[in-house]
Amino acid sequence: MVKKQKLKRENFKKRYNFKCCNCGFEQSASPSIMMTGFGMNQGHGSCRECKSFLHLEIEGGLDGDKMVSEDWNSFLKKQKIEVKPI
Ligand SMILES: [Zn+2]
């Protein structure tokens, strides 16, 4: 479960460093609208190096100072979200 946490918009950093869980490339991402707008620690993005689609979250909660990445599909499986075909 994603824990909701209220953090003022100005308390977020502009960029958070993270390492791609697939290729280890170090890069940074800005906080997602889910984080800044809804207080939910989840975001996503593509690795600049290997282009894998990644789930991103701020390590230790929204007041942390870096992000951790996880392969999108394994994140979805963990969340038990069913992806329905169109
Ligand atoms: Zn990568």
Image (cartoon, grey):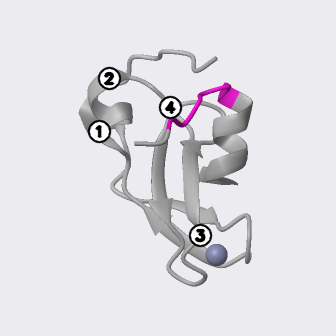
Q: Earlier in the sequence, mark 3 or mark 4?
A: 4
Position of residue 53 relative to residue 68, above or below, is below
Q: Which residue is mark 2?
A: 38
Label 4 packing within 10 angstroms: few (<14), some (14-19), many (20+): many
Circle on res. 52: 3
Contact flag, marks 2 and 3 (Cβ < 8 Å): no
Indicate the secondary structure of the residue bearing disc 1: helix
Magenta range: 79-84
- Quadrant holding the N terminus: top right
Work out whether residue 44 or residue 18 is closer to the camera in this orientation and state it. 44
Residue for point 35% across, 44% down: 32
Q: Which residue is mark 4?
A: 41
Q: Is residue 81 magenta?
A: yes
Work out whether residue 26 or residue 74 is closer to the camera in this orientation and state it. 74
Left or right: 16 with respect to 66?
A: left
- Residue type (three-letter) at the residue carrying disc 3: Ser
Indicate the secondary structure of the residue bearing disc 2: helix
- Residue type (three-letter) at the residue carrying disc 1: Ile
